[in-house]
Image (spheres, rainbow, N blue to C red):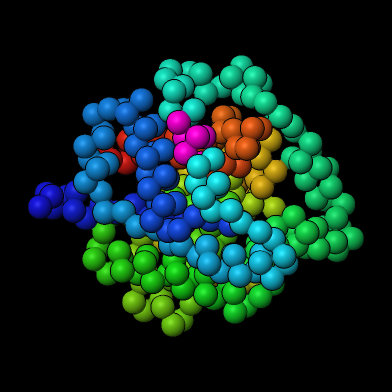
Amino acid sequence: MTDNVQQNRSLLLVHGRDFKPAATTYLELSLAAMRKGLERDFPDCVECFDRLSIDLAWYGDLNAEVLRRRNMHYDEELDIGDRRNALRALGEIIPRKKFGIRQYDKLPGKSALPEFFMDMGAPLLGAVGFRMPVIGKIAKDFAAYLDDPEFAEKARKRLRDRLCRLMDRGDNIMLVTHGTGSVIAYDVLWELSNDTETYADYGAFKVDQWLTLGSPLGDRAVQKRLLGAKERGQNRFPSNVISWHNLAAEDDYTCHDVTLADDFKKMLVQRQVSGVHDYRIFNLAVRYGKSNPHSSIGYYIHPRLAKILSAWLA
């Protein structure tokens, strides 16, 4: 049995869009990447990490249903193999100082064009009302979350049930969300701290640390679709997070707006969060032979995440 302090410390992950391996495999690879980052930079924290209560809010089957209806194919065995290859290569980068621009510029197939398009095109597309159709073209499952209430509620329930279970236990929670998962998490956090059906039971609970990785929450079109977006004052935002850390990788078009502190500064003014911290990083993951700056493996193993995680464990 673990000691009481560690027993009450829980890590909850939420994956992003697109096809995903089975929940057990995705969680195994994600934790292996996080553990490798700790082994590299903060080896004294590995034992604490191994004793954590860890869970995953997995909605990969919902994504797959949407994508397969649009005749998209998924080779799970190949995907898992490629993820393992990416993790192996990243694990061989030992000095944390190598996770910088020099190493990033050497990656095969590196391109800033997707992020450039999002940076330049987003304001114009938003102004003429075409932003959501473009999102739908690029990420059909993400568009389904924003536009299909039934899909959105199913996805939120996967996270809400797990998060409420940890809150019921009184756990100290770190919530780590990648890509679309950060939007789902935002909505669930808003529900628990604002919705009349859940506020009585969970309004007083706090998530100790929230990490958003490659998050689209800085996108204006996405912000307009968030729960609470039409509310005013304190009812507009979640009020159940103590510290919010946002990691945005260079050339990751999903988080083309790399800073969230400016978008959610009213949460600070209204004392609904202790801090919103933005970090610009370089994601060194290579998937299928070319740079993939949105890769979850690349985010999980990054020195910045390891530093935040080690501080929380300590």
Residue 130: quadrant of the picture? bottom right
Position of the C terminus by quadrant: top left
Residue 22's image quarter? Answer: bottom left
Q: Is residue 18 above or below residue 109?
A: below
Residue 194 picture location, percent across and down? 48, 73
Task: Please give the name of the residue rendered at 54% of the width and 40% of the height, measured from the top-left corner.
Answer: 82
Q: Nearer the viewer, residue 248 or 84?
A: 84
Q: How many marks?
A: 0
In the image, is 257 to the left or to the right of 83? right
Is 151 displayed left or right of 1 in the figure? Answer: right
Q: Main secondary structure of the magenta part?
A: helix
- Residue, x 42% and y 58% (percent of image)? 23
Q: Is residue 27 magenta?
A: no
- Report the residue at 25% width, 49% height from top: 52
Q: Residue furthest bottom?
A: 197
Q: Is residue 192 above or below residue 252?
A: below
> Is residue 288 among the parts visible in the rendering?
yes
Picture coordinates of residue 262, whole percent (x, y): 63, 46
Snapshot quadrant of residue 133: bottom right
Q: Judge from the rendering whether residue 82 lies leftward or rightward of residue 94; answer left or right.
A: right
Question: Which residues fall within the magenta stretch?
Answer: 83-88
Most foreground residue, 265 or 10? 10
The answer, for residue 283, to whether it is visible in the render is no
Does 307 sit above or below residue 181? above
Where residue 41 appears, x then y in whole percent? Answer: 35, 25
Pick whichever, 222 or 96, lies toward us: 96
At a point 85% along the width and 63% down the height, the residue shown is 129
Is residue 241 toward the left or the right of residue 138 in the image? left
